[in-house]
Amino acid sequence: MAGRLLSLGLADLKGSVGIGFDDGAWIGSAFNAALVFIGPLTVYLGGLLGARRVLLICAGIFTLVSAVLPLAHSYSLLLALLAIAGLSAGTFYPLTLTFALRSLPLRYLPLTLAVYASCIEGAVNFAPSLYGYFHDHLSWRWMFWAPAIITPVMMACIRFGVPSTKPPQRMGPAPSFAGFLYASAGFGLVYVALDQGQRLDWWRSGIFTALFVGGAFFLLCALLRRIQRPNPLVDLPYPMRSPLG
C-alpha cells in the first residue's frame, strides 16, 4: 500500500518539494530499488536473527521514517528517507510469507498463497480510493502518515502471532554474507536500470549501461560465490585466512 500510495501522490510530492520530471522519476526508484535490494539479504538476516526480531525492528524503522517523510523538503533527504523506508518495508514480503508457509500444514499451501496474494492485491486496488479521500478531505501527506498508523497494528500482530525462535544450529559452513550482498546489489542495480531505461533511452545512456552492467556483474559474482567456495576472486576475506597471510 505504501508503494502504491507513493506512485499515486507523486505529483503532489514533487510540487511540495519543488522538483521537475527528471528528478521526480527517481523518487519511486529510490523506494522500489531499496525494496528489491533488501530481498535476498532478508533471507540471511531472518535465518541469523529470526523472522520475528527482524520484522519488529524493520516495522519500527518504517513507522518512524513514514511519520517524518512529509516533513522532508530537501530532495536529497527525501531520497534517503525513501530508501530507508524501502529497506525496512522490503523485509515484510519474504519473512511473512515464509512464516505462513512454515507454520501451516502442507495441505493448506494453495489456500495460504491465495490469501496472501489477495491481501496484496486488495491493498494495491484499495489505495487509489484511499488516496482520493486523502486528497479531497485531508492532505497528500497522509499517503505517508497512513502507513505509519497502520504498521504498529501489524507490529502487534507480529508480537503476539509470531513466536520467538532460537537461532538455528549451524550445520556445515555458515551462509555467505558476501554472496547475499552481491545478489542484493545485482538485483537492485538491474531494477533501477530497467525502471529508468525508457527515460534514459536505454543503451544510448551511460547511466543505464553502468547500472545494468554493474548489476549483471554483481549477479555473476553471487553465482560464482555460490558455485565455488571458497574462491579468492569473489570471496574477499579468503586471502586473509590463508596460512601465508
Image: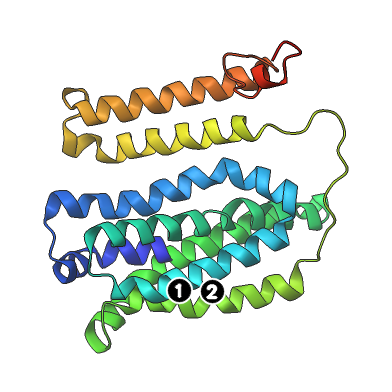
Residue 228 is at least partly visible in this image: yes
Q: Amino acid at mark 1?
A: Pro
Residue 50's place in the image compared with 168, above or below, is below
Residue at horizontal 67%, vertical 43%? 44
The front one of 124 and 164 is 164
Crowdedness of circle 1 by 10 Å Cα count: few (<14), some, many (20+)? some
Where does the image place residue 142, in percent across and percent down from the top left?
A: 34, 79
Residue 147's place in the image compared with 191, above or below, is below
The quarter of the picture where residue 204 lies is top left
Q: How is the image coloured?
A: rainbow
Residue at horizontal 49%, vertical 54%? 87
Residue 45's place in the image compared with 151, above or below, is above
Q: Which residue is mark 1?
A: 147
* Farthest residue, direction front: 245
Where does the image place residue 35, in percent across and percent down from the top left?
A: 46, 50
The quarter of the picture where residue 177 lies is top right
Q: Which residue is mark 2?
A: 151
Residue 73's place in the image compared with 105, above or below, is below
* Quadrant of the drawing holding the C terminus: top right
Q: Is 187 left, or right, of 18 in this rendering?
A: right
Q: Are marks 2 and 1 in contact (CB under 8 Å)?
A: yes
Residue at horizontal 31%, vertical 35%? 194
Residue 129 is at least partly visible in this image: no
